[in-house]
Image (spheres, rainbow, N blue to C red):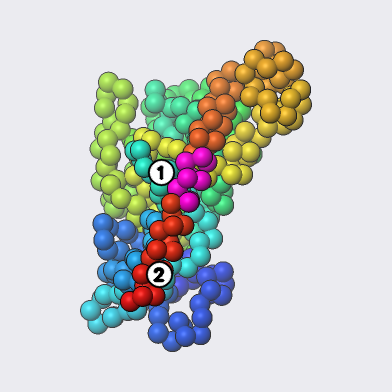
Amino acid sequence: MMPVELEALGWSAFFDSQITPAERKSLTPARVAVEFKATYRLLAECGELQADLAGRLRRLAQGRHELPAVGDWVLADCRENERQATIHRVLERRSKVSRKAAGARTEEQIVASNIDTIFIVGALTREFNLRRIERYLMMVWGSGAMPVVLLNKADLNPHPEALYDGLRSVAPGVPVHVMSALTGTGLSELATYLKPAITAAFVGSSGVGKSTVLNQLMAREVQRVHSVRADDDRGRHTTSSRQLFLLPEGGIVIDTPGMRELQVWDPGSGFGRTFEDIEELARHCRFRDCLHHSEPGCAVERAVGDGTLEPNRAENYRKLQKEAKYLERKQDALAQITEKKKWKKIHKALRK
C-alpha cells in the first residue's frame, strides 16, 4: 500500500487531542485495518504495518473490548524498515458498534469502531425480516453512528413495495435505498455517504450481498462471494473477519461477517430511538411499571387492539426489552468479577 495522509484514514482533532507530548515524540498514530488472532494490520502515513500488542497493554486489559478492534486508532512503536510495529495504546473511540459475544459468554464483542455511517443491508428475498432489521437499528442507534438501510437484490423482487412500506413503518426518518449490487442499480446513491475521510460499515446477515456491494464500490473483487442456498435463501459465511478498505474515490468502508446471532450489548438510547413510537405510547399507560402484556389501562395493548400498532412489532418490543434487562443483570455480575481481576493485576504488577 502507498503512504497515505492520516486525514484520509479518518484522523481528526478528536483523536489528536488525546496524544501526550511524550507520545508524539516516540509513537505513531495508525488505524487498525484487520484484526487477526494475535496480530493486526495497521494503516499509517508510512504505509501498511504488521503489529502485535505491547505486553503491558495485553496484561492490563480488563477484557477483549479494551484491546484494538477494526476501525480503532492506536499509538504504535513503528519499525518502518521491517514493516513491523508494536501497539502501546488504543485511543478513545468516537463511536463503536458492539454486541454480546456469540454463545454463553457474557462478553462484549466490538464489531467496528469510529464509524460515521452504518449500512444495514437486507435482501429482498424470502429471508427479509423486519424484526431483525429492528435489532440492527437498535445496535446502530446506540453506537453513535447514523443508520442507512440498503434493500439489496432488487433484481430478484420485481415488486418490493410491500417490503419497503413495512420497513418505513419501523424505521421512520432512516434513509432507505432499494438497490441491486449485482446489476449496479441504485449503487450511485451510496456516493452521498461515502465521502473522503468518512468511515462507513456494512452489517447484515450472511447472504444479503454486503461483499458484493463492497466489490462494486472497490471496482474489483476484494471479498469472495458465494451464492445463497436455493432451498431457503440463506447465505454461507464468505467474509470471515472484519476488514477496513480505502475506496478508490476516497472514503473508508468496513466490511463485517454475517451475524446469525445478534444480541445488542448496550441498548441504551438505541432502544428508545428504534421503538420511539411505542415508548411514546407507554408514557400513557395507567401504571408506570407496565409490562404491556394484559395489564389494565395499557396504552400499548390498546394500540394493538385498535390496529394502530402492528402486533409483531409490539411483541418484538417486549422481547428485546426483556433481553436487555436480562443482559443488564449479567453485566452487573460480570462488572464485579472484572473489578476484582483488575486490582489483582495491578497489585501483581506493582509487586514485580
- Magenta stretch holds residue 331: yes
Question: Mark 2 or 1 closer to N-term?
Answer: 1
> At numbered mark 2, what does the secondary structure look like: helix, strand or loop?
helix
Q: Which residues are magenta?
A: 328-336
Check disc 1 and give the amino acid type.
Thr
Residue positioned 26% across, 75% down in the render: 84
* Mark linked to residue 114: none
Q: Where does the image place residue 319, in percent across and percent down from the top left?
A: 53, 27
Q: Position of residue 91 (x, y in %)?
A: 47, 68
- On screen, residue 8 versus residue 141, left or right, reads left
- 88 left or right of 173? left
Residue 165 vs 211, above or below: the answer is above
Q: Amino acid at mark 2?
A: His
Residue 275 position (above or below residue 246): above
Is 272 drawn above or below residue 55 in the view shown? above
The residue identified by callout 2 is 347
| Viewer-closest of 256 and 327 | 327
Q: Nearer the viewer, residue 334 or 72?
A: 334
Residue 259, given in percent of the width and then of the height, sits at 37, 39
